[in-house]
Image: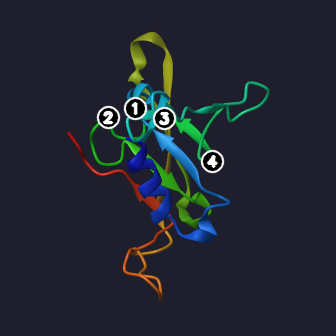
Amino acid sequence: KFSNITSMYSRLKPRSLANAIWAAHPSAFPQLASLALNVGTGGSAVGLVQNISQPPYLSILGRPLYLTEHCQTLGKAGDIILGDFSQYLFAQKGGVKYDVSLHVQFVSDETAYRFVMRYDGQPWEQSALTPKHGSTTLGSFVILETRS
């Protein structure tokens, strides 16, 4: 529903609007492509803006839309995300750890190599913030909740 999209947009911190992007699971694309704004008994399609000259090719409310399998499937919390990833902390623990094994494929004269790097990340903010005027919380990341 278009009202879900506008509600998500209104919950994003105003200072995050310039950097925000939409991320959605590919299974959400049919619903996003058929968004409509109801006006009385009429209405009109909202549609995804398509710019075929350069990426990103899709956008919603002026912000880029990226389809990714890393979001939850359609109907689950996190299937559509609006976020300002400049407010996301990313850390690497240690360096590259590597191992070599001559024994794994001994019969076929092969050597096995393994490389491991450890990463983690989380939003800069620990929780949503309540603005000075108003009671609706705002954040740099907004997800669409589970719905049927």
Where disc 2 sits, the SS reads loop
Looking at the picture, which amino acid does disc 3 mark?
Thr
Total marks shown come to: 4
Within 10 angstroms of label 1, few (less than 14), some, or many (20 or more) residues? some
Q: Quadrant of the N terminus?
A: top left
Q: Position of residue 53 (x, y in %)?
A: 79, 26
Q: Outermost residue, bottom direction?
A: 132
Query: Which of the pair 69/119 is nearer the observer?
Result: 69
Can residue 126 be seen here? The reply is yes
Q: Do tag 1 and tag 3 residues touch (Cβ < 8 Å)?
A: no
Q: CA distance from mark 4 to mark 1?
A: 17 Å
Q: CA distance from mark 2 to mark 3?
A: 12 Å
State whether residue 70 is above or below residue 51: below
**Residue annotated with mark 3:** 68
Looking at the picture, which amino acid does disc 2 mark?
Leu
Of marks 4 and 3, which one's residue comes earlier in the chain? Answer: 4
Q: Quadrant of the C terminus?
A: top left
Q: Which mark is residue 63?
A: 4
Q: CA distance from mark 1 to mark 3?
A: 10 Å
Q: Nearer the viewer, mark 4 or mark 3?
A: 4
Q: Do tag 2 and tag 4 residues touch (Cβ < 8 Å)?
A: no
Q: Residue at x 38, y 74 (%)?
A: 136
Within 10 angstroms of label 2, few (less than 14), some, or many (20 or more) residues? some
**Residue annotated with mark 1:** 28
**Residue annotated with mark 2:** 74
Of marks 1 and 3, which one's residue comes earlier in the chain? Answer: 1
